[in-house]
Image: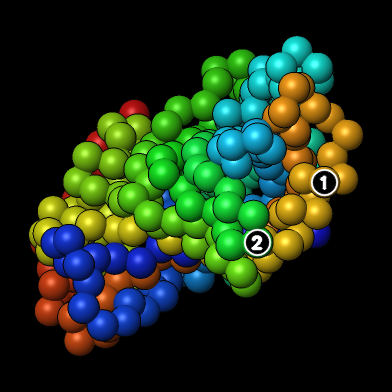
Amino acid sequence: MKKLLLTTITAAGLVLSGQAAATPFYLDLSDDGMVNPVGEIDQLDLSYVSNTEVDTATGSLVTRAGISLIGYTFGGVTAPAYTDLEDLVTESGGETNTFTSTPNFPGAGLDVTGPSWTKLTFDLYLEGTLTPTVGVDYTSGYLDIYSFDAFDYGAGATQVMTTELFAGGINPGEQVVQSLVTSTSITAAGQDMFFFGDGVTFQSFEDYISATLVDIILEASQTVSVLELEQNIANSTITNGTTVLVSDDHNAGVEFRVPAPATIALFGLGLLGLAGSTRKRRS
């Protein structure tokens, strides 16, 4: 099973100088109208299945995972990958296509009022070109985060964060994908859901971006070689003309990164006092 590491780093303006440090964050998935998360989270974890269509004549490829696979069929050759949201998030006993966390203790993603049945899933779509023995260059795509009610799958999933790819590909040793999280990326439903903080005061991701003028970059890296991808393509038995379908399992982790600690103190956490009394806008 290949490992896909999804991490987030930040960029001040268009370019980030120096290194970005992985920063613990908080999730508040309840609807009590207050900002009161408990449980510092190092990363979100995700097990999922991806489907990649590769045109062996041109090298063009499309990768889908998560919500993009609901109702998806390959050229009428295959049955739908998933029939609906419940099918997607309850596969393998609910351990696939739904985010957990590290550390995965009961308090993570909850708040002081108790547990929430709001869970998080995702949608991944990438387009690119494979150059044999060289690598893959991604030209467009996104990785979005959705919420859903684990007691009401029929209500569907709601987009809480959207990103747009600006760079990425597969080199001889790893896959790297970078997507921007900007001031317009957090949807109305995602307001006051993701936070940076110190356990006492908190600043939402949207407020952090607004206060610092720093976009968040979603960077994905995968320990898979071009040779391995080409072997999977050669071994695929599902074809439609010159296009083949490659399906694989992955384990993912999502980290949120901000600039070095001194920069955080100056531009980010130093403003948390302004956010301590923020009222949640989600309903």
Q: Is residue 16 above or below residue 112?
A: below
Q: Nearer the viewer, residue 165 or 183?
A: 165
Query: Residue 83 in the image: x percent, y percent?
Result: 72, 18
Instruction: Using the rendered view, name the quadrant where residue 66 is placed.
Output: top right
Instruction: Using the rendered view, name the quadrant where residue 172 is placed.
Output: bottom right
The CA span between labels 1 and 2 is 13 Å
Residue 282 visible somewhere in the drawing: no
Q: Quarter holding the N terminus?
A: bottom right
Query: Residue 95 in the image: x percent, y percent?
Result: 75, 47
Q: Nearer the viewer, residue 233 or 113?
A: 233
Q: Is residue 64 above or below residue 276?
A: above
Q: Amino acid at mark 1?
A: Ala
The residue at the point 52 percent across, 26 percent down is 157
The residue at the point 13 percent across, 72 percent down is 267
Q: Count neighbours of disc 2 (C-alpha within 10 A) and say few if under 14, some if 14 to 19, many if 20 or more.
A: few
Q: Is residue 183 left or right of residue 102?
A: left
Instruction: Using the rendered view, name the quadrant where residue 247 is placed.
Output: top right
Q: Quarter holding the C terminus?
A: top left
Q: Earlier in the sequence, mark 1 or mark 2?
A: 2
Q: Amino acid at mark 2?
A: Thr
Secondary structure of the residue carrying numbered label 1: helix
Label 2 belongs to which residue? 133
Query: Residue 205 in the image: x percent, y percent?
Result: 28, 55
The residue at the point 80 percent across, 27 percent down is 239
Label 1 belongs to which residue? 234
Secondary structure of the residue carrying numbered label 2: loop
Q: Is residue 259 left or right of residue 176?
A: left
Q: Are marks 1 and 2 in contact (CB under 8 Å)?
A: no
